[in-house]
Image (cartoon, grey):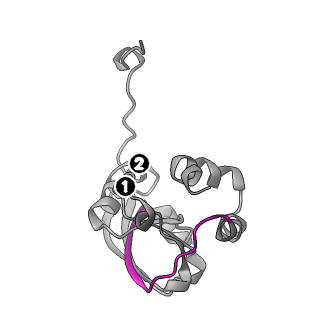
Amino acid sequence: MLQRWIEDGDTIRELAGSDAALIDGLRFCLPVYRGCAVTLYRGDSAFNRRRRTYGMSWSSDRSTAEGFARGVWQAHEGGSVLLKTLAPAEAIFCAPALLGDEFAEGEYLVDRRRLVRVEVLKRFPQVPMLVTAPEEIPARG
C-alpha cells in the first residue's frame, strides 16, 4: 500500500473525498511511525492555508517544500505559501522517507487535525499556469 501511495497519493486523496476518513484508513494500511516530533515543511495553496485543509504529505526538507510552493501551488487562486510545523509524533502516521526516499522528498504523512501550530514562512503571489502547446510535447516513440 505504501508504494501505491507514493505513486498515486494525489489521485487516492481526490477519490477518497474525505481527508479524515482517508487518514483513518491509511493508519491501518501503512507502516506506523514510531519516532518523535519532527520539524516539517509544506508548500500549499493560500486557499488551503486559510481553510487549514493542508494535505497529508509534508517534508523534512525546507527546499523540497518550497519547490512545491513555487510550483503547482503557486498557480492556484491567491498564490501559495511555505508552511512550517513541529509535528508531534501522534500527528505523524507514516514516514515514507525513513523507509526509502525514492523521490528524495523527505516525506512524512501527517494528520492535520493533530497539528498544534502551523506557521507561514513565505507567501508567493499567484502566477499563471504554464501550459505546453501540443506541438511542443515530444512524440512518444
Residue drawn at x 42%, y 15% as measured from the top left: 140
Q: Is residue 13 above or below residue 141?
A: below
Query: Label 2, label 1: how many angstroms apart (C-alpha)?
Result: 6 Å
The quarter holding residue 112 reads bottom right
In this rendering, would 113 be left or right of 78? right
Region rendered in magenta: 29-44
- Can residue 118 be seen here? yes
Which residue is drawn at the image coordinates 46% and 53% (left, top)?
A: 77
- Say which residue label 1 marks: 68
Residue 28: percent from the left, percent from the top? Answer: 69, 69
Which three-letter amino acid code belongs to the residue tagged 1?
Phe
Residue that numbered label 2 is attached to: 72
Tell me: 58 left or right of 114.
left
Of residues 118 and 39, which is closer to you in this image?
39
Would you say residue 96 sits in the magenta stretch? no
Q: Is residue 42 magenta?
A: yes
> Would you say 94 lies left or right of 105 here?
right
Label 1 Cα crowd, 10 Å radius (few <14 / some 14-19 / many 20+):
some
Which residue does the image show at 40% across and 40% down from the upper left? 129
Q: How many marks?
A: 2
Image position, residue 7 (x, y; %):
52, 47
Q: Residues within 10 Å of mark 2 (few under 14, many from 20)?
A: some
The quarter in which the C terminus is drawn is top left
Q: Residue furthest left?
A: 63
What's the residue type where badge 2 is placed?
A: Val
Judged from the image, the secondary structure of the residue bearing numbered disc 1 is helix
At mark 2, the secondary structure is: helix
Callout 2 touching callout 1 (CB < 8 Å): yes
Residue 45 visible within the image: no
Quadrant in the rendering for residue 138: top left
